Amino acid sequence: MTSVPHTVTAPAAEEHALRLRLKPKGPTTGYVDGAWWPRSADLVGELPELFAVLAVRLGRIERVTFHLGDFSEPPRRIVHDGERVRLEGFRSQRAGTVTVIGASDRHRVTLLTVPADANPEAAHDVQMAAAHRDNTDTVETLLGRLT
């Protein structure tokens, strides 16, 4: 068994559109604050673009939590824009979600995570539903629309 490095530097953001939809700012409802459709199961490779957008809402990103089965095994920390970001995988976190937490710990965004290999039309529809201001569907209900 090989061990994963504890800290790595996040790669530069790729040159393609980020597949992210967020609920409008303000009081939110439901289980998620929007949806993210990464292009792979490589969490470290996918995060830089996500951080660039979410930093507007969250400020400096401090932690990312995710379900252990959703991504390939990442290191415990990455360095992004000169700052360390903790990556914490939990079996107890609801599958199909990623939570990005700002440095103040009061600001966080929980995103539905659409599988990278999802059908494009269904994935788009699920992202739009998850990002609707009044959406209160569970993660399971939203992901169930992909089949």
Image: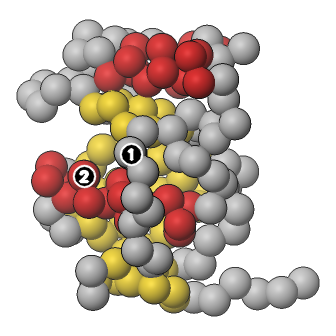
Q: What element carries label 2?
A: helix
The residue drawn where x is 76% and y is 87% is: 3
Residue nearest the viewer, comparing 49 with 111: 49
Residue 81 vs residue 122: left or right? left
Image depth: mark 2 or mark 1 in front: 1
Could you tell me the amino acid type at mark 1?
Answer: Leu
Q: Is there any visible trace of residue 138 in the rendered image?
A: no
Query: Which quadrant of the structure image shows residue 34?
Result: top left
Could you tell me the amino acid type at mark 2?
Answer: Val
> What's the mark number on residue 37?
none
Q: What element carries label 1?
A: loop
Residue 52 x, y percent position in the rendering:
26, 60
For label 2, the residue is 53
Query: How would you rate the neighbour count of disc 2 (Cα within 10 Å): few for under 14, some for 14-19, many for 20 or more?
Result: few
For label 1, the residue is 18
- Farthest residue toward the left? 26
- Farthest residue toward the right? 1
Residue 118 x, y percent position in the rendering:
66, 29
Labels 2 and 1 touching (C-beta < 8 A)? yes
